Image (cartoon, coloured by chain):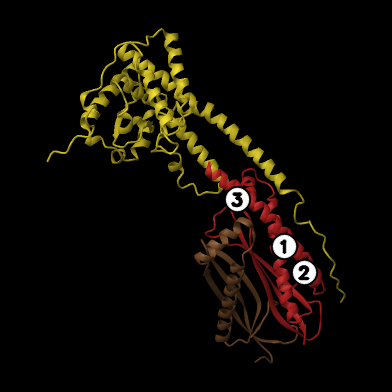
Chain colours: A brown, B red, C yellow
Amino acid sequence: MFISNLEFTTGKKVTKHLGLVQGSSVRAKHAGRDIMASLKNLFGGELKGYTELLQESREEATQRMLAQARAVGANAVLNVRFSTSSIAAGAAEIYVYGTAVILDGQG
Amino acid sequence: MYELIITLVLITLGYFFGSRAEKKHYKSIIEREKILNSLPVMASRIPIVKGDYDQILVSGNVVIASDYFKGFVASLRNLFGGRLRTYETLLDRARREAILRMKEQAQELGADIIFNVKYETSNISGQVSSKMSVIEVHAYGTALKKA
Amino acid sequence: MKYENPQIPEGINTTKEHPLKELLVLLIGSLLVILSITFVVTFGGGWLVDKIPFSIEKKVSNMYDVEKHVDDKRAPELIHYLQGLVDQISEAQDLPEDIKITVHFINSGTVNAFATLGGHVFVFRGLLEKLPNENTLVTLLGHEIAHVKLRHPIKSLSAGIFFSILTSAVTGGTGSDLLGSAGLLGSLKFGRDMEQQSDKEAMVSLQGMYGHLNGGAELFRIFQKMKEESDIDEPVKMFSSHPHDEKRIKNFQVVAKDKGWHETGALTPLPDFFQHSFVARKVN
């Protein structure tokens, strides 16, 4: 599936717009990670566990958005935006949205 | 009394380890920025290059924590207001690191230029006490690769 | 189209100032703030607290179920006796009419006694067991009653709340246990001059009830002896905030000489049940 945060493509033409599609993923850091994080917190620096966690979470949200796009018969998502919000203690929501379109000459 | 001693120890440890980590991180950022300088990154929405290009969404993220010293200075600063100098470097490092990771991903894919770069910054401190802040910076954009 | 990728110089988004310098400036600043607040609270706060009627203090203390923490019901004889003394002392100290003292007994070996909000005075078994005569007991009760009379609990409470607000602002705590950390139910810490004022009132009670001060200084000698015998971990809480006992004894003598009060006189013995047990035996 073609995915881009531009609202057009450089080569192919958009033949049909199918509206907004979105994906979200709420994940909590588990206690073990939290303890490690608070230790790390004393000294500063990168929290690798969290970086990976949010990466996975973003991946999942994107897959969900693509699933929505596939369901409406689109073959590309354009103008994609991400947003992250801390919704509760120790939990973060990743939200991704974009416009589902059908591109010329795409599978 | 014990609490005071523990706090002092934490502040000292935080200062030494934190500033060492920061120096190391800056050194690595500057080095990698030089290496990746050949790959241009633009905030503009419309690509300045014309022709047949593949579009690929690339991204980089980093979660970075402040140390106890930074948190302590910031909480004191909160009483008086003003510039939180200790957090400036934290955010600066996180933003540049995220961009570098995005660039590294783009370079692996053989991209020529990255467009429409967006940043997201979020506080994910959560359960970790409010003395310490944990932030995530996520950078993403569209990489163009000659088809 | 032409494009170039120039290197951006460092240090535009960050401040080039040593963080330790900032820490120093901030520490000095907050120290000054704390000092000026202490100044305002000790001088201005005391004046303000005098304007709070005792009935409000009583209402605050009524939020807590005092009965649950004390053993008054198990020692009716003792409470009756103590309350009788307390009423006499209140008269000797010329307590304002709206202030009513209630004495409570706690069946614990801790050598301590304290006064808290709402005119509640708590005495522990551990301290009662060490008292040689009634005159010393009156000194102790007189001291605690004086705390209530001079509104010390509410004064230190308001200062305590203020400081816990300040510390929670600095440490970023939630402040949910503000009242708890200020020690509403526990023994409040009083300043040294508060203790000295109360000592003086205790002497007034002694003089009023017996016509002499004999037995008063004995209280401080008990504390002094306890301090010498005890390890740091011993639950001898009462001493930590109190002025040096030697100094208190001397102060006693100075005031006595000043007022022309006698330091000798007949001691009144404690009632018989002090020899046996404070707690009434269960009747089967």
The residue beneath circle 3 is: B10
Instruction: Report which residue position mark 1 lands on.
Output: B25
Residue C50 drawn above or below residue C266: below
Whether residue C158 is situated above or below residue B69 in the rendered picture: above
* Residue to which mark 2 is pinned: B32
Disc ID at residue B71? none
Q: CA distance from mark 3 to mark 1?
A: 21 Å
Q: CA distance from mark 1 to mark 2?
A: 11 Å
Nearer to me, C197 or A62: C197
Judging from the image, what secondary structure is the residue with disc 2 in? helix
User: Within 10 Å of the Cα at label 1, are there few (<14), some (14-19), or many (20+) other Cα atoms?
Assistant: some
Q: Quadrant where the N terminus of chain C lies? A: bottom right
Question: CB of mark 2 within 8 Å of CB of mark 3?
Answer: no
Q: Position of residue A103 (x, y in %)?
A: 67, 88
> Which quadrant holds the C terminus of chain C?
top left
Q: Are marks 2 and 3 on the same chain?
A: yes
Q: Nearer the viewer, mark 3 or mark 1?
A: 3
Q: Mark 2 or mark 3: which comes first in sequence? A: 3
Q: Chain of mark 3?
A: B
Location of residue C282 by image quarter:
top left
Side (left or right) of B67 relative to C189: right
Task: Indicate which disc, 1 or 2, sits on the residue closer to the N terminus.
Answer: 1
Looking at the image, which residue is at 58% across and 52% down? B131
User: Where does the image place residue C2, in percent across and percent down from the top left?
Assistant: 87, 75
Kind of residue indicated by mark 2: Arg
B51 or A93: nearer the eye? A93
Note whether residue A42 is visible.
yes
Can see residue A7?
no
The subunit carrying tag 2 is B
Q: Check disc 3 and report its element: helix, strand or loop.
A: helix
Mark 2 or 3: the one toward you: 3
- The residue positioned 52% from the left and 70% from the top of the image is A26
